[in-house]
Image (spheres, helix red, strand yellow):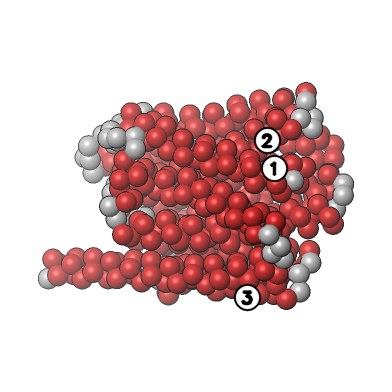
Amino acid sequence: MTVSAPAPRADTPLTRLLARVARVEPHEAPAVVTAVILFFCVLGGYFAVRPLRETIATILGGDRVAHVWIVTSIGAVAIVPLYGWLVGRVRRAVLMPSIYGFVAVSLAAFGLLLRARPGDIAVSSVFYVWISVLNLMLVSVFWSFLLELFDSGQAKRLFGFIAAGGTAGALVGPVLTDLTVQHIGSSGVLFIGATLFACAIVAQRVLVRIWKQGRARHAAPPPDRGLGGNPFAGFSIVFRSPYLLMLALFVVLLSTANTLLYFEQLNIVRETFPDIAQRTQVFARIDYAVQTLTVLSQLFLTGRIAATFGVRALLVVVPFVMVAGFLALAAVGGFAILAGAMIIRRWGEYAFIRPGREMLFSRLDTEAKYKAKNLIDVPVYRGADLLVAQLQNALRAGGLTSAGVALLGAGAALAWAGVGWWLGSRAEATRANDERRVAGGQA
């Protein structure tokens, strides 16, 4: 089901602006604006608390974080059948807002716990695991619903712009943290995140209503019911599809590059910035540098690149750039080079890779969009995090230097680019075949 044209809408300054900036058609404006607000709240809430997660990681240390990632990976696997069961049995109009409500309550609870027990390793570790599992889950849930709301043509045209709403939230969140953390403390930041997720509940309910109205205009069957099926169906769907297996490999290689950089970041930041509050500010400032670049790219570049050069361009540019970034890190090293590589990697992932990945799911059926997508987005990603973290620790214990880690990253990034090229080519070929079939049917 897609957002389709109802009766003609009056031309307004907002619809003219949206048409000029992102080629949003007038009948799409309510859904697009609501999706932008929703994603703003979701990523704003997460990125407000993300600097606290990174600060906790520096306190735990690289060895303990690597062990915590084992628990994170177990949680990521465990959440798949739970989410599959919920999607199969709970109406989306209830499930989607309830997820955001659960997050809001959880953040407030962790805020109270960390305020009552500051520096508690057990509480800090549980929070780190919880937020690490949840952040991927939240983004996956959001895009799964949008894939049901928009068709593949709309996705290519609109997803970059909608992603910019999330990026704006991801920019505002760490700015709020940077401005307030010295006054309200790290635990107080969690209440900012909880407030933004409470706002996400309202936006999701509005988006569900728009979705239902679109179905009603076409006399479509009532969509607001569970999908049914096996809660473990995501595993079988992925293993039966070479396309989804390659998409999973793409995520594994993406995670590999990210994890290698992440553990170098922990070591260098801990050595460079001894003050804990200062580390939180550093991570916040990196976050809003990334988000500023990303929101500008998503507003003015992502959709145009996808429409002009295809999804393949979105998938391969960043891995090729990261090959150069890893080689520079191997040759020079230091905080400045690492920060630059982290900013470029995250900017590219949010501005190009993530919208491109979501476009790859647009032609799949509804069950795959929710169950297989969640499997790839959460446990595959976190499982790769775990394996690479353990491998990196073992290699460092065996004497591998930071330069050697960077060279491994360059090789992983090159393989990442190759898989992205294959996926992009496959998606473009499928799109061309579909267009030929439609043209032939009309003839």
Secondary structure of residue under mark 1: helix
Q: Earlier in the sequence, mark 3 or mark 1?
A: 1
* Kind of residue at disc 2: Ser
Q: Is residue 274 above or below residue 304?
A: above
Secondary structure of residue under mark 2: helix
Mark 1 to mark 2: distance in Å? 9 Å
Q: Is residue 402 above or below residue 34?
A: below
Which residue is depicted at the point 68% across and 59% down?
398
Mark 2 to mark 3: distance in Å? 34 Å
Name the residue tied to disc 2.
125
Which image quadrant is residue 60 in? top right
Which residue is depicted at the point 84% across and 48% down?
278
Circle number at residue 64? 1
Which image quadrant is residue 104 in? top right
* Kind of residue at disc 1: Arg
Secondary structure of residue under mark 3: helix
Name the residue tied to disc 3.
324
Q: Tell me if label 2 and label 3 are in contact, CB under 8 Å.
A: no
Image position of 216 (left or right of 330): left
